[in-house]
Image: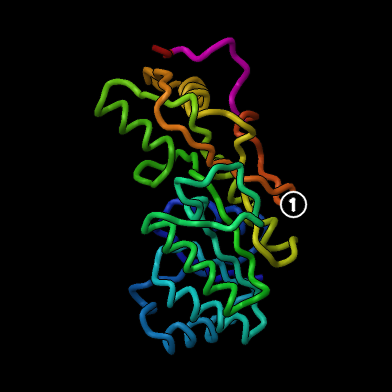
Amino acid sequence: MKALVTGMRGTVAPVFAQALRAEGVSVVPWDRDLHPIDNPEAVRFFIRAERPDLFCHLALGSPDWAEWAARTCAEMNVPFLYVGSVSVYGSAQTGPFAPADLPVPDDDYGRYKFECERRVLAAHPRAHVVRIGWQIGDRPGGNQMVDHLDRTFREQGRIDASVRWFPGCSFLPDTAAALVRIAKRRPPGLYHLDGNPGLNFFEIASGLNDLLGRPWAVAPVAGLVQNRRMLDPRAPVASIQARFRACVGPRNIV
């Protein structure tokens, strides 16, 4: 089995590619330097030349690229996976969100991701579209939670973490494994992946502080009030709480 994967310079795709390879799938990265993404014929030519068994679109790129790739795969009867985001739900919307809940994005990124979803499903009605939350990884320089917390502590000397913010999130390897399961074994459709069973951001930051042995000073605040969790019993992903070792309390709470 061969998968064509976009976004290999990003946060999620490299870990997802590892999970695919662990299942015996050959991974072909989409190199934008060699294969243009701004020309529909070039997109079509590359996909047809590779003839993948699975197309996985995890990259940031224009909605046109997503649509052209999805349409080409539909013509070839190639399964298509698009990885979306909880950001399609606007700040005025309150979770936990089910796949049937209509997004009302209110920022540029959310509108962009929702437009990509819309175009992919219009071009390839049997695509998998999977919304994920904030990823928890260990790769420096990525757009993930640990990097954010490291940077915040480095710049501010403490981490103010809201006890009234419930982010959608999961550990990156768990997300990658769940994406592989969906792509290979679940019927087409719209899915949500979220490993947060109901922890607030203070509990998550404190748990990560202890789990990773960081020197963070984590302070509970009542600031941001949001529930950004997602629900989907069809798409289980490992609970983040299961990765936090049992302890009486985190070591660096202020």
User: What SS does tag 1 mark?
Assistant: loop
Above-or-below relation of 111 to 119? above
Please provide percent x and percent y for residue 73: 59, 80
- Residue type for callout 1: Arg
Q: Residue at x 31, y 30 (%)?
A: 152
Question: Residue 200 versus residue 215: which sits nearer the camera?
Answer: 200
Colour scheme = rainbow
Q: Residue 96: horizontal and vertical position, in percent?
A: 61, 42
Does residue 71 appear in the picture of this structure? Answer: yes
In this view, the residue in front, 221 or 92, is 92
Question: Above or below — where is 18 with respect to 64?
Answer: above
List x then y, in percent, for residue 226.
Answer: 49, 36
Residue to which mark 1 is pinned:
234
> Which SS does the magenta portion mostly show?
loop
Question: Is 48 drawn above or below residue 183 in the view shown?
Answer: below
Point out residue 254 in the picture as x, y percentages from the top left corner: 39, 12
Residue occupying the point 42% across, 35% down: 146
Crowding at dot 1, Cα within 10 Å, few <14 / some 14-19 / many 20+, comes out as few
Looking at the image, which residue is at 49% across and 39% down? 136
| Residue 64 drawn above or below residue 241 | below
**Left-right relation of 95 to 209:** right
Q: Residue at x 57, y 29 (%)?
A: 199
Question: Number of marks in the image?
Answer: 1
Over which residues does the magenta segment extend?
A: 243-251
**The N terminus appears in which quarter of the rendering?**
bottom right
Decide whether residue 166 is among the magenta residues: no
Residue 84 appears left or right of 23: left
Q: In the orientation shown, which residue stands out farthest toward the front?
A: 92
Residue 212 showing in the rendered view: no
